[in-house]
Amino acid sequence: MPGARSPTLARSPGARSVTYRLFSCGLQRPHELNVFALENARCFYELLFSASASAALEMAADPKHLGAEIGMISILHTWGQNLLLHPHVHCLIPAGGIAPNHKTWTTPPYRFFLPVKVLARVFRDKFLDGLERLYRGKKICQAGPAALLGSPKRFDRLLSRLRRKKWVVYAKPAFGGPQQVLRYLGRYTHRVAISNHRLTSFDGERVTFRWRDYAHGNQQRSMTLAADEFLRRFFLHVLPKGFVRIRHFGFLANRCRTARLQLCRQLLSCSPPPAIITSNTTTGEPRPTWKCPQCGAPMELLLRLTPQELVSRHRFFDSS
Protein backbone atom coordinates (compact mmCIF):
# COMPACT_ATOMS: atom_id res chain seq x y z
CA MET A 1 0.00 0.00 0.00
CA PRO A 2 1.90 3.09 -1.17
CA GLY A 3 2.44 5.90 1.24
CA ALA A 4 0.89 9.34 1.02
CA ARG A 5 0.72 12.54 2.98
CA SER A 6 -1.22 12.15 6.23
CA PRO A 7 -4.58 13.94 6.53
CA THR A 8 -5.56 15.35 9.90
CA LEU A 9 -8.71 15.14 12.01
CA ALA A 10 -9.43 18.19 14.22
CA ARG A 11 -6.08 18.03 15.91
CA SER A 12 -4.43 20.47 18.30
CA PRO A 13 -1.11 22.15 17.42
CA GLY A 14 1.79 19.71 17.53
CA ALA A 15 -0.45 16.65 17.49
CA ARG A 16 0.21 13.70 15.24
CA SER A 17 -2.08 13.05 12.33
CA VAL A 18 -4.43 10.20 11.49
CA THR A 19 -4.06 8.60 8.07
CA TYR A 20 -7.04 6.79 6.62
CA ARG A 21 -6.28 3.99 4.20
CA LEU A 22 -8.53 1.63 2.36
CA PHE A 23 -8.23 -1.95 1.32
CA SER A 24 -10.94 -3.77 -0.57
CA CYS A 25 -10.87 -7.54 -0.44
CA GLY A 26 -13.23 -9.72 -2.39
CA LEU A 27 -13.76 -12.78 -4.49
CA GLN A 28 -12.74 -11.43 -7.87
CA ARG A 29 -11.14 -14.83 -8.37
CA PRO A 30 -12.28 -17.55 -8.08
CA HIS A 31 -15.89 -17.31 -9.26
CA GLU A 32 -16.50 -21.01 -8.56
CA LEU A 33 -17.62 -20.04 -5.04
CA ASN A 34 -20.58 -18.06 -6.34
CA VAL A 35 -22.65 -21.26 -6.52
CA PHE A 36 -22.62 -21.33 -2.70
CA ALA A 37 -23.65 -17.68 -2.45
CA LEU A 38 -26.72 -18.29 -4.63
CA GLU A 39 -28.24 -20.83 -2.24
CA ASN A 40 -26.54 -19.81 1.02
CA ALA A 41 -26.41 -16.03 0.88
CA ARG A 42 -26.56 -15.35 4.62
CA CYS A 43 -23.84 -17.76 5.78
CA PHE A 44 -21.69 -17.02 2.70
CA TYR A 45 -21.71 -13.25 3.30
CA GLU A 46 -21.23 -13.74 7.05
CA LEU A 47 -18.14 -15.80 6.25
CA LEU A 48 -16.90 -13.12 3.85
CA PHE A 49 -17.15 -10.51 6.63
CA SER A 50 -15.55 -12.67 9.32
CA ALA A 51 -12.69 -13.98 7.15
CA SER A 52 -11.70 -10.55 5.80
CA ALA A 53 -11.88 -8.87 9.22
CA SER A 54 -10.07 -11.71 10.99
CA ALA A 55 -7.28 -11.70 8.40
CA ALA A 56 -6.65 -7.96 8.72
CA LEU A 57 -6.91 -7.86 12.52
CA GLU A 58 -4.65 -10.89 12.94
CA MET A 59 -1.97 -9.57 10.60
CA ALA A 60 -2.05 -6.10 12.13
CA ALA A 61 -1.65 -7.57 15.62
CA ASP A 62 1.44 -9.50 14.50
CA PRO A 63 4.60 -7.62 15.65
CA LYS A 64 6.25 -8.56 12.34
CA HIS A 65 3.82 -6.25 10.52
CA LEU A 66 2.27 -3.63 12.82
CA GLY A 67 1.82 -5.07 16.32
CA ALA A 68 -1.29 -3.07 17.13
CA GLU A 69 -5.07 -3.23 17.43
CA ILE A 70 -6.66 -1.63 14.36
CA GLY A 71 -10.22 -0.58 13.53
CA MET A 72 -12.25 -1.41 10.42
CA ILE A 73 -15.46 -0.37 8.71
CA SER A 74 -16.54 -3.11 6.28
CA ILE A 75 -19.19 -2.70 3.59
CA LEU A 76 -20.58 -5.62 1.59
CA HIS A 77 -21.07 -5.36 -2.17
CA THR A 78 -22.44 -8.22 -4.22
CA TRP A 79 -22.47 -6.86 -7.77
CA GLY A 80 -20.20 -6.02 -10.66
CA GLN A 81 -20.87 -3.43 -13.35
CA ASN A 82 -22.67 -6.02 -15.50
CA LEU A 83 -24.98 -6.91 -12.53
CA LEU A 84 -23.62 -10.44 -12.24
CA LEU A 85 -22.90 -11.83 -8.79
CA HIS A 86 -19.55 -10.54 -7.52
CA PRO A 87 -19.41 -10.66 -3.69
CA HIS A 88 -16.67 -8.56 -2.11
CA VAL A 89 -16.07 -6.37 0.94
CA HIS A 90 -14.74 -2.81 1.02
CA CYS A 91 -12.82 -2.05 4.21
CA LEU A 92 -11.87 1.38 5.51
CA ILE A 93 -8.95 1.24 7.96
CA PRO A 94 -7.03 3.97 9.82
CA ALA A 95 -3.33 3.50 9.02
CA GLY A 96 -2.22 2.71 12.52
CA GLY A 97 -3.49 1.20 15.72
CA ILE A 98 -3.36 1.03 19.50
CA ALA A 99 -0.23 -0.57 20.92
CA PRO A 100 -0.75 -3.60 23.22
CA ASN A 101 0.16 -1.51 26.29
CA HIS A 102 -2.48 1.10 25.32
CA LYS A 103 0.11 3.85 25.80
CA THR A 104 1.12 4.67 22.21
CA TRP A 105 -0.33 4.93 18.73
CA THR A 106 1.55 2.60 16.38
CA THR A 107 2.15 3.37 12.70
CA PRO A 108 3.64 1.07 10.04
CA PRO A 109 7.44 1.08 9.87
CA TYR A 110 7.34 1.00 6.05
CA ARG A 111 5.57 2.82 3.21
CA PHE A 112 2.60 0.48 3.11
CA PHE A 113 0.08 -0.58 5.71
CA LEU A 114 0.01 -4.39 5.40
CA PRO A 115 1.63 -6.62 2.74
CA VAL A 116 -1.28 -7.40 0.43
CA LYS A 117 0.14 -10.67 -0.93
CA VAL A 118 0.42 -12.10 2.56
CA LEU A 119 -2.99 -10.66 3.45
CA ALA A 120 -4.51 -12.34 0.40
CA ARG A 121 -3.14 -15.73 1.46
CA VAL A 122 -4.38 -15.35 5.04
CA PHE A 123 -7.80 -14.23 3.80
CA ARG A 124 -7.98 -17.18 1.39
CA ASP A 125 -7.06 -19.73 4.04
CA LYS A 126 -9.50 -18.34 6.61
CA PHE A 127 -12.36 -18.22 4.11
CA LEU A 128 -11.78 -21.76 2.81
CA ASP A 129 -11.36 -23.14 6.34
CA GLY A 130 -14.66 -21.54 7.31
CA LEU A 131 -16.37 -22.84 4.18
CA GLU A 132 -15.11 -26.36 4.90
CA ARG A 133 -16.48 -26.19 8.47
CA LEU A 134 -19.89 -25.14 7.14
CA TYR A 135 -19.82 -27.94 4.57
CA ARG A 136 -18.76 -30.66 7.02
CA GLY A 137 -21.34 -29.41 9.51
CA LYS A 138 -24.06 -29.68 6.84
CA LYS A 139 -24.90 -25.98 7.21
CA ILE A 140 -24.73 -25.34 3.46
CA CYS A 141 -27.72 -25.97 1.24
CA GLN A 142 -26.59 -27.99 -1.76
CA ALA A 143 -29.60 -27.35 -3.97
CA GLY A 144 -29.56 -25.58 -7.33
CA PRO A 145 -26.10 -24.91 -8.81
CA ALA A 146 -24.41 -26.04 -5.58
CA ALA A 147 -25.80 -29.56 -6.09
CA LEU A 148 -22.86 -30.29 -8.41
CA LEU A 149 -20.60 -30.09 -5.35
CA GLY A 150 -22.75 -32.34 -3.18
CA SER A 151 -20.15 -35.09 -3.39
CA PRO A 152 -17.46 -34.72 -0.68
CA LYS A 153 -14.82 -35.76 -3.23
CA ARG A 154 -15.86 -32.98 -5.62
CA PHE A 155 -15.89 -30.48 -2.77
CA ASP A 156 -12.41 -31.56 -1.65
CA ARG A 157 -11.09 -31.20 -5.21
CA LEU A 158 -12.61 -27.70 -5.37
CA LEU A 159 -10.94 -26.67 -2.10
CA SER A 160 -7.62 -28.08 -3.23
CA ARG A 161 -7.82 -26.14 -6.50
CA LEU A 162 -8.85 -22.90 -4.76
CA ARG A 163 -6.01 -23.11 -2.23
CA ARG A 164 -3.54 -23.06 -5.12
CA LYS A 165 -5.07 -19.97 -6.70
CA LYS A 166 -4.10 -16.38 -6.01
CA TRP A 167 -6.91 -14.48 -4.35
CA VAL A 168 -7.32 -10.74 -4.81
CA VAL A 169 -6.86 -8.14 -2.09
CA TYR A 170 -6.70 -4.65 -3.56
CA ALA A 171 -5.26 -1.72 -1.62
CA LYS A 172 -5.53 2.01 -2.28
CA PRO A 173 -3.28 4.81 -0.99
CA ALA A 174 -4.27 7.10 1.86
CA PHE A 175 -7.16 9.51 1.47
CA GLY A 176 -6.50 13.24 1.40
CA GLY A 177 -8.51 14.02 4.53
CA PRO A 178 -11.74 13.40 6.48
CA GLN A 179 -13.92 14.96 3.77
CA GLN A 180 -12.61 12.45 1.24
CA VAL A 181 -13.30 9.63 3.70
CA LEU A 182 -16.92 10.74 4.11
CA ARG A 183 -17.32 11.20 0.36
CA TYR A 184 -16.03 7.68 -0.27
CA LEU A 185 -18.30 6.15 2.36
CA GLY A 186 -21.27 8.05 0.95
CA ARG A 187 -20.73 6.41 -2.42
CA TYR A 188 -20.82 2.90 -0.97
CA THR A 189 -23.09 2.78 2.07
CA HIS A 190 -26.54 3.17 0.50
CA ARG A 191 -26.18 2.05 -3.09
CA VAL A 192 -28.20 -0.49 -5.01
CA ALA A 193 -26.93 -2.74 -7.78
CA ILE A 194 -27.57 -0.16 -10.51
CA SER A 195 -28.47 3.53 -10.37
CA ASN A 196 -30.99 5.26 -12.61
CA HIS A 197 -28.42 7.30 -14.54
CA ARG A 198 -26.92 4.11 -16.00
CA LEU A 199 -30.26 3.04 -17.53
CA THR A 200 -30.48 4.33 -21.09
CA SER A 201 -33.59 2.73 -22.63
CA PHE A 202 -36.44 0.26 -22.17
CA ASP A 203 -38.68 -0.72 -25.09
CA GLY A 204 -41.04 -2.90 -23.10
CA GLU A 205 -39.02 -6.07 -23.67
CA ARG A 206 -35.32 -5.13 -23.43
CA VAL A 207 -33.33 -2.98 -21.02
CA THR A 208 -30.18 -1.16 -22.09
CA PHE A 209 -27.71 0.19 -19.57
CA ARG A 210 -24.14 1.52 -19.42
CA TRP A 211 -21.37 -0.41 -17.73
CA ARG A 212 -17.60 -0.19 -17.36
CA ASP A 213 -15.51 -3.07 -18.65
CA TYR A 214 -12.69 -3.12 -16.10
CA ALA A 215 -11.13 -6.17 -17.75
CA HIS A 216 -10.48 -4.20 -20.96
CA GLY A 217 -9.07 -0.82 -20.03
CA ASN A 218 -12.04 0.48 -18.01
CA GLN A 219 -13.96 1.14 -21.24
CA GLN A 220 -17.57 2.27 -21.02
CA ARG A 221 -19.92 0.00 -22.94
CA SER A 222 -23.65 -0.57 -23.39
CA MET A 223 -25.41 -3.83 -22.59
CA THR A 224 -28.90 -4.85 -23.64
CA LEU A 225 -30.73 -7.60 -21.76
CA ALA A 226 -34.18 -9.09 -21.95
CA ALA A 227 -36.35 -7.65 -19.18
CA ASP A 228 -36.60 -10.96 -17.31
CA GLU A 229 -32.81 -11.45 -17.44
CA PHE A 230 -32.27 -7.89 -16.21
CA LEU A 231 -34.63 -8.54 -13.29
CA ARG A 232 -32.94 -11.88 -12.56
CA ARG A 233 -29.56 -10.19 -12.30
CA PHE A 234 -30.92 -7.32 -10.22
CA PHE A 235 -32.58 -9.62 -7.68
CA LEU A 236 -29.35 -11.56 -7.21
CA HIS A 237 -28.35 -8.65 -4.98
CA VAL A 238 -31.35 -8.54 -2.65
CA LEU A 239 -29.87 -9.40 0.74
CA PRO A 240 -31.46 -11.79 3.25
CA LYS A 241 -34.02 -10.13 5.49
CA GLY A 242 -32.39 -8.23 8.33
CA PHE A 243 -28.86 -8.76 7.04
CA VAL A 244 -26.46 -5.98 8.13
CA ARG A 245 -24.19 -4.98 5.24
CA ILE A 246 -22.12 -2.36 7.12
CA ARG A 247 -20.10 -3.70 10.05
CA HIS A 248 -17.40 -2.48 12.43
CA PHE A 249 -14.44 -4.42 13.80
CA GLY A 250 -11.43 -3.90 16.05
CA PHE A 251 -11.46 -0.70 18.06
CA LEU A 252 -14.42 0.48 15.99
CA ALA A 253 -16.60 -2.46 17.10
CA ASN A 254 -19.82 -1.44 18.82
CA ARG A 255 -18.92 -3.09 22.14
CA CYS A 256 -15.83 -0.93 22.71
CA ARG A 257 -15.95 1.93 20.20
CA THR A 258 -16.67 4.79 22.64
CA ALA A 259 -13.84 3.93 25.02
CA ARG A 260 -11.38 3.01 22.27
CA LEU A 261 -11.97 6.18 20.25
CA GLN A 262 -11.47 8.27 23.36
CA LEU A 263 -8.17 6.45 23.91
CA CYS A 264 -7.17 7.04 20.28
CA ARG A 265 -7.80 10.77 20.63
CA GLN A 266 -5.68 10.87 23.77
CA LEU A 267 -2.81 9.00 22.11
CA LEU A 268 -2.98 11.26 19.04
CA SER A 269 -3.66 14.46 21.01
CA CYS A 270 -6.79 15.05 18.95
CA SER A 271 -9.59 17.31 20.09
CA PRO A 272 -12.98 15.62 20.66
CA PRO A 273 -15.55 15.86 17.84
CA PRO A 274 -18.01 18.77 18.02
CA ALA A 275 -21.30 17.98 19.75
CA ILE A 276 -24.26 17.52 17.41
CA ILE A 277 -26.98 17.94 20.03
CA THR A 278 -27.25 20.67 22.67
CA SER A 279 -29.79 21.26 25.41
CA ASN A 280 -32.65 23.75 25.10
CA THR A 281 -32.20 26.35 27.86
CA THR A 282 -35.94 26.78 28.45
CA THR A 283 -37.23 23.19 28.42
CA GLY A 284 -34.04 21.22 28.95
CA GLU A 285 -34.95 19.06 25.95
CA PRO A 286 -32.17 18.26 23.50
CA ARG A 287 -32.36 20.22 20.29
CA PRO A 288 -30.35 19.75 17.09
CA THR A 289 -27.81 22.36 16.06
CA TRP A 290 -27.68 21.48 12.35
CA LYS A 291 -29.47 23.59 9.76
CA CYS A 292 -31.68 22.80 6.79
CA PRO A 293 -29.54 22.66 3.63
CA GLN A 294 -32.34 24.30 1.62
CA CYS A 295 -33.55 27.26 3.72
CA GLY A 296 -30.87 27.49 6.43
CA ALA A 297 -33.38 27.34 9.30
CA PRO A 298 -32.51 25.18 12.33
CA MET A 299 -33.83 21.64 12.14
CA GLU A 300 -36.35 20.61 14.79
CA LEU A 301 -36.47 17.19 16.43
CA LEU A 302 -40.02 15.84 16.04
CA LEU A 303 -39.78 12.23 17.14
CA ARG A 304 -37.26 9.67 18.34
CA LEU A 305 -37.74 6.06 17.20
CA THR A 306 -36.10 2.92 18.50
CA PRO A 307 -34.99 0.26 15.95
CA GLN A 308 -38.04 -1.83 16.93
CA GLU A 309 -40.37 1.12 16.29
CA LEU A 310 -38.76 1.71 12.90
CA VAL A 311 -39.47 -1.87 11.88
CA SER A 312 -43.06 -1.77 13.12
CA ARG A 313 -43.80 1.57 11.43
CA HIS A 314 -42.06 0.74 8.16
CA ARG A 315 -42.47 -2.90 7.28
CA PHE A 316 -40.53 -2.43 4.06
CA PHE A 317 -37.78 -0.26 5.54
CA ASP A 318 -34.43 -1.14 3.98
CA SER A 319 -31.26 0.51 5.23
CA SER A 320 -29.19 -0.77 2.29
Image: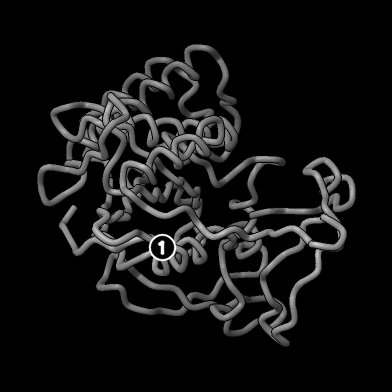
Label 1: how many Cα within 10 Å (few below 14, some 14–19, many 20+):
some
Residue at the outermost front position: 281
Residue at the outermost left position: 110
Residue 75 appears at what percent x and percent y? Answer: 49, 49
Closer to the camera in the image, 128 or 293: 293
Quadrant in which residue 263 is drawn: top left
Q: Quadrant of the C terminus?
A: bottom right
Quadrant in which residue 197 is drawn: bottom right
**For the residue labelled by badge 1, is the local secondary structure a helix, a strand or a loop?**
helix
Q: Is residue 194 above or below residue 73?
A: below
Q: Is residue 194 above or below residue 149?
A: below
Closer to the camera in the image, 114 or 79: 114
Residue at the outermost top position: 137
Residue 119 appears at what percent x and percent y? Answer: 24, 37
Q: Is residue 227 above or below residue 142?
A: below
Which residue is tagged 1?
A: 181
- Residue at figure coordinates x 45%, y 31% from the top left: 50
Q: Amino acid at mark 1?
A: Val
* Colouring mode (rainbow / by chain / secondary structure / one colour): one colour
- Viewed as shown, does residue 244 lie left or right of 5? right
* Residue 103 showing in the rendered view: yes
- Residue at figure coordinates x 46%, y 26% from the top left: 149
Q: How many marks?
A: 1
- Residue at figure coordinates x 52%, y 39% from the top left: 258
Residue 135 appears at what percent x and percent y? Answer: 48, 18
- Residue at figure coordinates x 43%, y 65% from the top left: 184
* Residue 123 showing in the rendered view: no
Residue 231 appears at what percent x and percent y? Answer: 66, 62
- Viewed as shown, does residue 305 lie left or right of 73? right
